[in-house]
Amino acid sequence: MPQLRKDLTSRTWVVIASERGKRPHDFKVVPDQKKGEGNCPFCPGHEGETPPEVLALGRGEITPDIPGWKVRIVPNKFPALSQESVEPSFRDGPLVQRPGIGVHEVLVESPDHNSTFGTHSQEQMEQILGAMISRIKQLRADSRLEYVQLFKNVGRTAGASLEHTHCQLIATPIVPPVVDEELRCAHFYYEQYHSCVWCDLLTKAHENGLVVEASPHFAVICPFASRVPYQMLILPTRHGGEFESISQNELADLAAVLRRTVRKLEVAFNSPPYNLQWHISPLHEPGDYDRYFHWHLELLPRLTIAAGFELGSGIYINPTAPELAAQELREVKIDATTGI
Ligand SMILES: [Zn+2]
Ligand SMILES: [Zn+2]
Ligand SMILES: [Zn+2]
């Protein structure tokens, strides 16, 4: 029978339509036709086609914007927000407009056009996470910025416009509403139960068969109120708000967990489109949110399409119970060839 479940971190509700029990083979994923390396601006040798890099790892040279890099961060050619925005503030009664100050950058994960989070080497994945952390630390110095949203879109239906493996980073002058809502929910939960909502969700996930993998420093779970089939939450087992404060051991473990988790998706669903997003603490928010905010990654496979009911009501209908999803994902055999 269908159940309504409340997501404690967003106050949204989901309908778990478990009688549908959709398993991996019920989702027909048609992989995008790849155009290949050809004229890709992110491939080595094409560095001049992107704006000048802001960070590059792995290249021994001092000269920027030449091949030899392992990971490269460049400004987005068509930024959603810009550090140079000079649009004046404007107010007309209730209407508010502020300058679109911010940063929009692309992290090119690898010189290899076709590699993925599921096939990068362990060393490559660690460099990617290291580059993200360096950039977040640099952006904290800009007092105009309040938040750094790291995310990754894979596949056209998930919003990726370039196929070369990459992540994006958008720093905003406000705390985005989704994160603000998570902070409020977590604060409310803390006041009520005197503990962190994510720490408690992890304990409950262990009790209820929702854990896909538990590594030394991280856990991958299918959230109790998963909005979409095979949604996953990657949580550090050590409570904390700052992604960039992880130790070298934790970083290496996260790299391995991410590689295995994405590889499982690729194997089970024939490389489906997905969105991966980081939720980390705001850059300058005063207060004691570190007591109740717990940074995490949300992985949302795009196997179903949100339609009128979801968009109109904010209630999601999920045809795969997260308990079933976790069980299926635990059983996915990932190939040994990637060394995972
Ligand atoms: Zn490329
Ligand atoms: Zn916690
Ligand atoms: Zn979140």
Image (tube, rainbow, N blue to C red):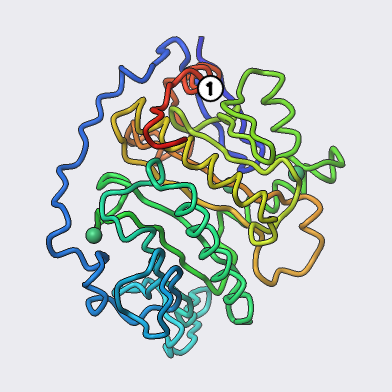
Q: How many marks?
A: 1
Q: Nearer the viewer, residue 161 or 110?
A: 110
Q: Position of residue 175 (x, y in %)?
A: 59, 65
Q: Give the residue displayed 58% in from the left and 53% down from the top.
A: 279
Q: Give the residue displayed 25% in from the left and 47% down from the top.
A: 156
Label 1's element? helix
Q: Amino acid at mark 1?
A: Ala
Picture quarter with ligand 1: bottom left
In the image, residue 75 above or below residue 23: below
In the image, residue 218 above or below residue 145: above
Q: Is residue 28 left or right of residue 19?
A: left
Q: Position of residue 212 (x, y in %)?
A: 56, 26
**Dot 1 corresponds to which residue?**
326
Q: Give the residue displayed 75% in from the left and 38% down from the top.
A: 199
Q: Position of residue 284 (x, y in %)?
A: 69, 72
Q: Nearer the viewer, residue 209 or 219?
A: 219
Q: Nearer the viewer, residue 91 or 324?
A: 324
